[in-house]
Image (cartoon, rainbow, N blue to C red):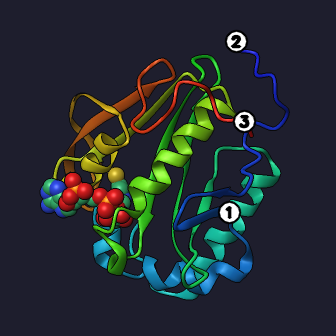
Amino acid sequence: MFQHNIYGLFSMPTLETPRLILRRITMKDAPAVFEYSRDEEVARHVLWTAQRHISEAKDYCRYMMRRYKADEPSSWGIILKETNTLVGTIGFMSYSEDNNSVEVGYSLARPLWNGGYMTEALSRVIDYAFDAMEINRIEAQHELSNPASGRVMEKCGMTREGVLRQRLFNKGKYVDVALYAILRSDPRPGKKKAGRVY
Ligand SMILES: CC(C)(COP(=O)(O)OP(=O)(O)OC[C@H]1O[C@@H](n2cnc3c(N)ncnc32)[C@H](O)[C@@H]1OP(=O)(O)O)[C@@H](O)C(=O)NCCC(=O)NCCS
C-alpha cells in the first residue's frame, strides 16, 4: 500500500486558475447545480440522467458534503470568477489506494462549452493530484460519441491508451469508451520542471 505523507487525501481545498475557482460544494449551490444538470445535452454522455427537480440537485450537494466529511473521492464546484456562479463540477470518481491512482470526471454548463474552461480546470486538478496528493496515475474515460471530452484530456497531456468496447451501459445502450491516463512522470503541458508548492 502506498503511504501518503499528507492527512486527509480528499481534503478538496480551494484551487484557482486564471478564470475559475474550484471549491467545495455547499447546499447553497443547489439552484446552480440544477440549472445545468437539467440540460439533457449536458447529461447525454455522463452516468447520471438530467435532473427534473431541484430536490435532485439538493440530494447531490448533500451527497458531496457527506463525501467531504468522510474524506472520500469527491468533486469541486467550478465557479466562474467573472460572474461568481457555479457552472459545473470536476473531481475524483474513484481512488485505488493499492495502485495510488484516481479517475477524474467533469461536467460544465452548455453555454460555456468550447471556451477552454474544462481544460483549464482539469489541468489544475492534474497538477494538484500529482503535486499535492502525490498520486501516480490519473485516468479518465469518455464515450467515443463525446469527442470534445477526449480533446480536453488530450490538451491536458493525457495519453489515449485504448478503446474499451461496450464498457458501459448508458441511457439504454452499450457504449464504447476511450481510456486516457497521465502518469506523474509524464510531461505536463505548460508545466515547469519543479513541482508547485501548495
Ligand atoms: C466535455 C466538456 C467537459 C468539454 O468542456 P469545454 O470547457 O467545452 O472544453 P474545452 O473548451 O476546454 O475543450 C473542448 C475541445 O473539444 C473540441 N470539440 C468540441 N466539439 C467537438 C467534436 N464534436 N469533435 C471533436 N472535438 C470537439 C473543441 O474544439 C475544443 O478543442 P480545441 O481547443 O482544440 O478547439 C463539456 O462539453 C461538457 O461538460 N459536456 C457535458 C458533460 C460531459 O460530457 N462530461 C464529460 C464526460 S466524459
Q: Residue 143: horizontal and vertical position, in percent?
A: 24, 49
Within the image, what quadrant is residue 3 found in? top right
Mark 2, Cα crowd under 10 Å, few <14 / some 14-19 / many 20+, is few
Depth check, front residue: 34 or 17: 17
Residue hosting label 2: 1
Question: Height in image: 61 above or below 39?
Answer: above
Within the image, what quadrant is residue 50 found in? bottom left
Mark 3, Cα crowd under 10 Å, few <14 / some 14-19 / many 20+, is few
Q: Which is more N-terminal, label 2 or label 1?
A: 2
Q: Which is more N-terminal, label 2 or label 3?
A: 2
The secondary structure type at the circle numbered 3 is loop
In the rendered image, the quadrant that contains the C terminus is top right
Please identify, in this view, whether the residue under mark 1 or under mark 2 is nearer the observer. Answer: 1
Within the image, what quadrant is residue 59 found in? bottom right
Q: Residue 39: horizontal and vertical position, in percent?
A: 35, 80
Question: Height in image: 113 above or below 22?
Answer: below
Residue hosting label 3: 197
Q: CA distance from mark 3 to mark 1?
A: 18 Å
Q: Residue at x 20, y 48 (%)?
A: 174
Q: Residue 157: horizontal and vertical position, in percent?
A: 35, 35
Ligand 1's quadrant = bottom left
Amino acid found under the numbered disc labelled 2? Met
Q: Are marks 3 and 1 in contact (CB under 8 Å)?
A: no
Please identify, in this view, whether the residue under mark 3 or under mark 2 is nearer the observer. Answer: 3
Residue hosting label 1: 23
Q: Residue furthest right?
A: 7
